[in-house]
Image (cartoon, grey):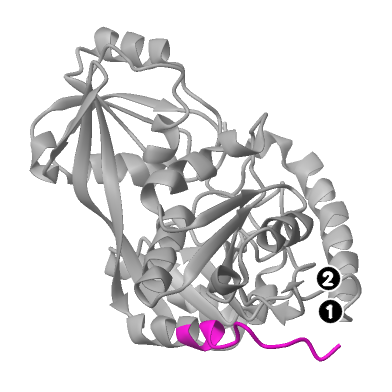
């Protein structure tokens, strides 16, 4: 099983330590080239520069990125901007089938979605096809883009999970870090997510300050706004209080499953079965039905990202929380950074 200190079991530590050193050497070489600008290009279409903002993280595993991306897109759309979400498309046989793309179709309907491992090429191809007046309104939002440095960005937002910051750990696969913690200094903004607990927030803030050399910029929580309850293919909306006192099976394939289960319990539900898979893996409807039946659960609670990957509608009632981002500090600082990025749109290339 994965350990809180890393994705692989601790008994593999002698091997994972050596692997992390090799991985770190590769990351250092790659970042040194990118720091010099080698292979980095701005996104220009029809002679105009399209602003790019990145929302990413320094660690593997869930930091609550998808709800934050959806919040950003809603904010941009409210100001008349057309967001374009560019994502790699993890675990999908076909680009449009990636769990992120399917999730954003519901949570960020105002955004265009571009799914391709070569995001720079795919963005240029997609944006070249649209009318000039719409192109002038576009801003690209790189989903999980902090390490995708080949595409220059006007704003770099890094999210740090306050419940599992991991900045005092090792590189993959001996820890959760994709690159050394000190590289967080490259970020324009650092936002603590899942910052409900004051002690967790304080610890994460200290780790960010030590690695970055200055404090984080904002902190937010991910709240459940409402519940989408699906029974026999029909869906209705219920308040979060609907789960209070219910026996439930809690199922997720997320980077940080413990936080999802904790939110289920916070809603007042009693978890009688916990189902987990590695991030981006899909559950079969039969798995959810069998687990609910064995445990005597009244319903299954799963994430939107997991729900969109189901092969069919389960026989059991399925509850999908609808998330919203709420800031506990720094919201105006984030809004100002978004506005500054948007102001770069339409600038003519100087090349």
**At x 40% / y 82%, what residue is drawn?**
335
Residue 342 sits inside the magenta stretch? yes
Residue 38's x, y, as percent?
A: 91, 74
Residue 350 left/right relative to 189 = right
Q: Give SS at disc 1.
A: helix
Alpha-carbon distance for marks 1 and 2?
6 Å
**At x 67% / y 80%, what residue is drawn?**
186
Q: Which residue is mark 2?
A: 31
* The C terminus sits in image quarter: bottom right
What is the span of residues highlighted in magenta in the rendered image?
Answer: 339-351
Quarter of the image where one finds residue 39? bottom right
Q: Residue furthest bottom?
A: 350
Label 2: how many residues lie within 10 Å, few (<14), some (14-19) or many (20+)?
some
Residue 24's x, y, as percent?
A: 82, 60
Verify CB contact (< 8 Å) between mark 1 and mark 2: yes
Return the residue nearer the eye: 165 or 15: 165
**Residue 162 visible in the current orientation:** no
């Amino acid at each position: 099983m994965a350990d809180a200190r890393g994705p692989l079991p601790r008994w593999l530590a002698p091997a994972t330590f050596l692997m992390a050193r090799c991985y770190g050497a590769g990351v250092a070489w790659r970042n040194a080239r990118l720091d010099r600008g080698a292979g980095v290009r701005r996104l220009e279409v029809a002679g105009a520069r399209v602003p790019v903002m990145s929302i990413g993280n320094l660690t593997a595993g869930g930091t609550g990125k998808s709800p934050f991306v959806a919040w950003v897109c809603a904010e941009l759309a409210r100001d008349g901007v057309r967001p374009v979400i560019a994502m790699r498309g993890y675990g999908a046989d076909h680009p449009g089938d990636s769990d992120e793309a399917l999730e954003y179709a519901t949570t960020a309907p105002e955004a265009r979605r571009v799914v391709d491992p070569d995001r720079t090429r795919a963005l240029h191809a997609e944006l070249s096809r649209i009318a000039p007046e719409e192109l002038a309104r576009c801003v690209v939002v790189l989903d999980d883009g902090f390490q995708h440095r080949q595409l220059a960005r006007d704003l770099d937002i890094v999210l740090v999970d306050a419940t599992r910051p991991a900045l005092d750990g090792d590189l993959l696969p001996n820890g959760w870090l994709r690159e050394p913690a000190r590289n967080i200094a490259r970020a324009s903004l650092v936002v603590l997510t899942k910052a409900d607990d004051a002690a967790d927030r304080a610890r994460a803030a200290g780790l960010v300050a030590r690695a970055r050399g200055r404090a984080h910029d904002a902190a937010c929580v991910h709240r459940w706004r409402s519940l989408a309850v699906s029974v026999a293919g029909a869906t209705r909306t219920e308040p979060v209080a609907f789960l209070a006192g219910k026996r439930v099976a809690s199922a997720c394939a997320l980077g940080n499953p413990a936080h999802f289960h904790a939110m289920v319990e916070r809603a007042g539900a009693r978890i009688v079965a916990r189902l987990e898979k590695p991030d981006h893996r899909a559950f079969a409807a039969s798995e959810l039905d069998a687990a609910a039946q064995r445990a005597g659960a009244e319903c299954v609670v799963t994430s939107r990202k997991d729900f969109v990957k189901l092969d069919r509608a389960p026989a059991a009632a399925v509850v999908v929380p609808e998330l919203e981002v709420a800031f506990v500090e720094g919201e105006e600082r984030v809004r100002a950074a978004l506005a500054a990025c948007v102001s770069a749109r339409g600038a003519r290339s100087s090349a």
